Image (cartoon, rainbow, N blue to C red):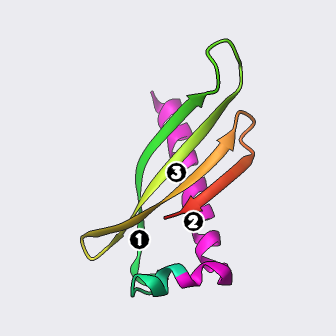
Amino acid sequence: MNKFNEIVENYFKRSIDSYHSCIQNEENRYLFREIGLSHRDVQPEKDAIKILYNDSRSAYYVIEVRLNLWSKQSNVGHYILILDEENQVLDDYLV
């Protein structure tokens, strides 16, 4: 189980790092202005990791890592990082 926990923690760490890179992008600053918060007031929290197969007969899958975004005990959205089977970033989105 220790190796599994390490893998899970690495996915969450990568997602948190990616979230911070995303919010540092000036193009995304408007999202926080829309909800009346500073990006500094929003904290990511580990939520879930999903492995999604395209087809049961295929070896292709994606890994979806989800973070909930909290500000003062209130959920204000989520961030999702999507990786392919080689751990390359396919997409990410901030809601």
Instruction: Identify whether 55 is placed above or below 92.
Output: above
Q: Residues within 10 Å of mark 3 (few under 14, many from 20)?
A: many
Outermost residue toward the top in this view: 57
Q: Residues within 10 Å of mark 1 (few under 14, many from 20)?
A: some
Task: Say the numbered circle drawn on residue 19.
Answer: 2
Above or below, 59 against 63 in this view is: above
The residue beneath circle 3 is: 12
34 to the left or right of 71? right
Residue 36 spot, x, y in % from top left: 39, 87
Q: CA distance from mark 1 to mark 3?
A: 14 Å
Residue 40 position in % (x across, y down) = 46, 83
**29 is within the stretch colored magenta:** yes
Quarter of the image with the N terminus in it:
top left
Q: Residue 44 at what x, y percent from top left?
A: 43, 65
Depth check, front residue: 78 or 8: 78
Determine whether the residue tagged by mark 2 lies in a helix, strand or loop. helix
N-terminal-most mark, 2 or 3: 3
Q: Which residue is mark 1?
A: 43
Q: Amino acid at mark 2?
A: Tyr
Percent position (x, y) of residue 15?
57, 55
Q: Secondary structure at mark 3?
A: helix
**Which is nearer the N-term, disc 1 or disc 2?**
2
Name the front one of labels 2 and 3: 2
- Residue at image x 40%, y 86%? 37
Of the image marks 1 and 3, the number of the one nearer the N terminus: 3
Query: Residue at 58% of width from left, 75% of height from top?
Result: 23
Which residues lie in the magenta part? 1-30
